[in-house]
Image (tube, grey):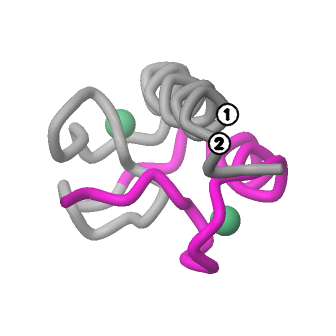
Amino acid sequence: MMCACANGDGNVDANDLKLLNDNQSTSKPSGKSICDIGPMPWGDGVVDKKDIEVFMEYWKYEYATGGLE
Ligand SMILES: [Ca+2]
Ligand SMILES: [Ca+2]
C-alpha cells in the first residue's frame, strides 16, 4: 500500500504538508520522489497541487478513522 507520509516518519501530519509545499514544482522520475503521491495511485513525476489534494484526503481519512490524535 502506498503511504501518503511524505517524510517517511509513519505519521500523516503537518510536517508532511510542509514538505509537500517545500517541494512544489519539483519533478523526478515517477515513483522516485517521496513527495509525489498524486494523482492516485503512484503519482505523475511532478510535485504539485494534485499531490497536496491526495495528501489532504489521507489526512482527513486518518482523522476520520482515529489514526491521529
Ligand atoms: Ca510524516
Ligand atoms: Ca504528483
The quadrant of the picture occupied by the N terminus is bottom left
Please report the residue visible at 47 percent of the width from the left and 41 percent of the height from the top. Answer: 47
Please report the residue visible at 62 percent of the width from the left and 50 percent of the height from the top. Answer: 67
Question: From the viewer's perspective, is residue 50 above or below residue 30?
Answer: above
Q: Is residue 67 left or right of residue 2?
A: right
Task: Measuring from the top left, give residue 8's x and y in whole percent.
Answer: 55, 77
Which picture quadrant has residue 46?
Answer: top left
Front one among 46 and 64: 64
Question: From the viewer's perspective, is residue 41 above or below residue 31?
Answer: above
Alpha carbon separation for disc pair 2 and 1: 5 Å
Tell me the magenta residue range.
1-27
Q: Is residue 50 left or right of residue 61?
A: left
Q: Which mark is residue 7?
A: none
Task: Measuring from the top left, give residue 24's x and y in whole percent.
Answer: 62, 39
Of tags 2 and 1, the one toward the viewer is 2
Q: Which mark is residue 66?
A: 2
Task: Measuring from the top left, give residue 19's x and y in whole percent.
Answer: 72, 56
Ligand 2's quadrant: top left
> Which amino acid type corresponds to the residue marked 1 in the rendered image?
Tyr
Residue 2 located within the stretch drawn in magenta: yes
Residue position for label 1? 63
Contact? badges 2 and 1 (CB < 8 Å): yes
Which residue is the extreme one toward the front?
A: 66
